[in-house]
Amino acid sequence: MESKIEERHPDKRYLYVCEGITDEDKLKKLGCLFVIPTEGVFIRREILDFLDKCKDVRDIVLVLDPDGPGRKIASLVEGRIGPCLHINVPKKKAIKKGKVGVAEMDIQVLKDYLRAFVSHDLFTDERLSLEEEDFLDLGLVGQGSKAKRMKLVEQYSIPYTSGKRVEDCLLMLSVGKSEIKEILTDD
């Protein structure tokens, strides 16, 4: 449960990196607001590019499976963006029906390992950079919105194109409405 480095962004919530969508759902249920799944050991370049931008805004916590692929993902991520914080769960606490991983962990055990990080997130007075209506006001959802989102995807190396994922990624980067408006009006 010890982290390898000290916080660099104590006034911001953490960004959690996990392996898959099941892990992401579990982390969100435990109160982790900002979560990026790597989609396995073959991490897309766009995800690494995005994490590289995020490291300048918030501390990154690796919540990966305690197995070979999990160690490989940690190595790839840290090889690209530098040292991260880690949740180091013993393998024996992450096994269920012969499978190893965060998804197989008892939720209470995972909660115990995440306690300090989630507690930090809950008590950090970070004002989110966007509100729900901002995304609507900027025309980033609904008819004709995909072209606008694609501008932001390119600008910020966002690895997703769906409205909700783009919004989440902009929040992770602490990008505000005025900055988005400026990018969308530049041609």
Image (cartoon, rainbow, N blue to C red):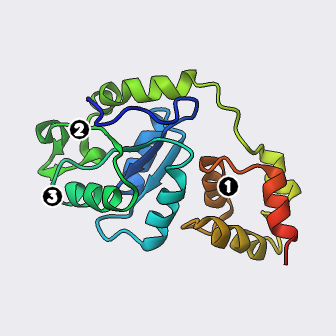
Judged from the image, the secondary structure of the residue bearing numbered disc 3 is helix
Residue identified by numbered label 2: 88
Residue drawn at the location 83% of the way across and 47% of the way down: 133
* Left or right for 146, reference 108: right
Checking the image for residue 167, the label placed there is: 1
Task: Kindly identify the amino acid type of the residue bearing the numbered disc 3.
Answer: Gly
Q: Cα distance, mark 2 to mark 3?
A: 13 Å
Label 2 sits on what residue type? Asn
First-in-chain label (3 vs 1)? 3
On the image, the x and y values in percent for residue 116 come to: 39, 24
Tell me if label 1 and label 2 are in contact, CB under 8 Å: no
Count of numbered labels shown in the rendering: 3
Q: Residue at x 29, y 38 (%)?
A: 87
Judge by depth and name the residue closer to the eye, 68 or 56: 56
Q: Is residue 20 above or below residue 113?
A: below
Assess whether mark 1 and mark 3 are in contact (beta carbons under 8 angstroms). no
Quadrant assignment for the N terminus: top left
Q: Position of residue 51 (x, y in %)?
A: 48, 57
Can you identify the residue that label 3 sits on? 68
Q: Earlier in the sequence, mark 2 or mark 3?
A: 3
182 with respect to 160 (left or right): right
Quarter the C terminus occupies: bottom right
**In the picture shown, does residue 2 fall above or below 37?**
above
